[in-house]
Image (cartoon, coloured by chain):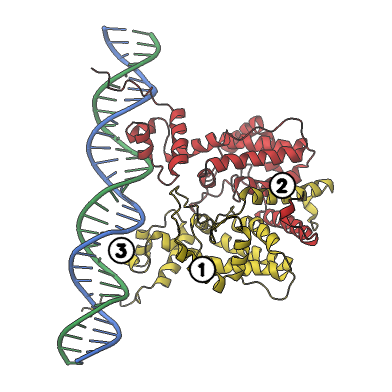
Chain colours: A red, B yellow, C green, D blue
Amino acid sequence: MTQQIAERRPRLNRDRVLQAAVALADEVGIGPLSMRRLAQELDVVPMALYKHVANKEELLDGMVDVVIGEIDPPVAGADWKSMVRLRVLSARRVLQRHQWARRVLETRTNPTPAVLGYMDSFIGMFFAGGFSVDLTHHVMHAIGSRMWGFTQELFDATATSDGDAPAPVAPEVQAAMYQEMSANYPNVLQVATAASHDDGSVVGSGCDDQFEFEFALDLLLDGIERLHQLQWVSSEHPSL
Amino acid sequence: MTQQIAERRPRLNRDRVLQAAVALADEVGIGPLSMRRLAQELDVVPMALYKHVANKEELLDGMVDVVIGEIDPPVAGADWKSMVRLRVLSARRVLQRHQWARRVLETRTNPTPAVLGYMDSFIGMFFAGGFSVDLTHHVMHAIGSRMWGFTQELFDATATSDGDAPAPVAPEVQAAMYQEMSANYPNVLQVATAASHDDGSVVGSGCDDQFEFEFALDLLLDGIERLHQLQWVSSEHPSL
DNA sequence: CCTTTGAGGTGTACGACGTACACCTATCTG
DNA sequence: CAGATAGGTGTACGTCGTACACCTCAAAGG
């Protein structure tokens, strides 16, 4: 009789927790997704979740990773433009499927390995297309905000988003980060270091946000001007 | 002795509440901004706030209005491109000053009059520049997501953002909305109705999100392609 | 001048929330 | 079979938004 009525519930694990969280958020939205509600869904007491995720923030990190994992890998053997285009559209489809994801992604304060990996592979598409590190950097900002649906500070480790002072990073920690980056995310590292030559930090954004903003803005305005001059109308859906 | 020690605190009103809320959010961030904390700042008991704001959502609406009000009006007598450019940059400066504003703006489910007024005047700049209603519509989407820092659903009344079913709108209410719109926001109305010809609703977005997305994406990709072909480098900061 | 009234401010209370901490109990290892 | 340890439980605390009943005080009417 030690066996409970339901001999099901095959023991929780981190993955089942994340999957359930994603499913629940898809169903009811991110607002009503509470630890208690999620626990209930898994037929478990709230505190049980904390054996698999450190806290709610880490749960959200994990959910983001699940979502990122759903974005298609780059299609092989195409020109950079169609590769990038398809991948951005794939990302859009995923974020559309999980409406809450954009909002959550936006609140992540530092990128998970899955996000870094995605960025790295994305940057790789530009490199393969013969882009300079410099242009790739600016372009990632411009495309990134379209792809994610918000202007990102994903790399800006200095933004704690709650106004606390940025924790100073010890040199040896920074060195370790560098090792990690160069082993796993060489493209990200290349872009990041090139962008922060005037800044001491390896991980800080170190780039000129104002410039990035105007870069993308002018890209848009120039494109718009061209369409205006051409008397472009959408009903014909011509190539831009 | 009925007079309290401090004869100051010149009686609360909605405006003082909003100003204090904005100042507090600027200082400590949006996370720690609670009704209780705000009340404390105003030297008042939490429930006192509810005499001036219906609830926290309405407080946030009011805060957004304060922020929107800080964006510069269009400069007179310039071409559309510089007018738009300056105004977007002004909006950016404001959102930069109030870091929390972007996140809050994003969670607003329907636009306040201040936001509608701003949109209306923004659309007006394109109309004055000779843009068609059609092109203006697409361009507002593309520029909008750059200006606000996120891809907007500001007009999408069907998105309750917590997954609830969209409340059906009675015909007479819809008629009243129409009156209101045509009186105060004629430009918005024009763009909205043109965009939703296939949709019955006046206020629903009714436009093809996928198309808007690809429109802006291709605008970017084409611009990027041009830069790539020109071997553009940022260090020289040439005009794009 | 006194009374009435209603807007503005108070106090208490409730049901959410995230999660610390001490505890129990399966399951696996030696 | 014994002991360890990963997984699950129960209770409790401090936070949040806000409903509801109450008080108070400035202005207005007799």
Q: Chain of mark 2?
A: A
Q: Chain of mark 3?
A: B
The amino acid type of the residue labelled 2 equals Val
Residue tagged 3:
B47
Query: Viewer-proximal residue, C29 or B187?
Result: B187
Look at the numbered disc 3 and give the secondary structure of its residue. Answer: helix
Is the residue marked by circle 3 packed among few (<14), some (14-19), or many (20+) residues within 10 Å? few
Residue D19, quarter of the rendered image: bottom left
Query: Viewer-proximal residue, A121 or A88?
Result: A88
Q: Position of residue A238 (x, y in %)?
A: 76, 50
Asked if the residue under mark 1 is in contact with the one under mark 2, i.e. CB atoms within 8 Å, the reply is: no
Residue at image location 64% in from the left, 30% down from the top: A184
Checking the image for residue B113, the label placed there is 1
| B134 versus B11 height, above or below | above
Residue tagged 2:
A139
Question: Is residue B71 visible in the rendered structure shown here?
Answer: no
Please state if A229 lies on the left or on the right of A173 as rendered. right
| C19 versus D3 height, above or below | below
Residue B239, quarter of the rendered image: bottom right
Residue, far right? B230
Look at the numbered disc 2 and give the secondary structure of its residue. Answer: helix
Look at the numbered disc 1 and give the secondary structure of its residue. Answer: helix
Checking the image for residue A32, the label placed there is none
The amino acid type of the residue labelled 3 equals Met
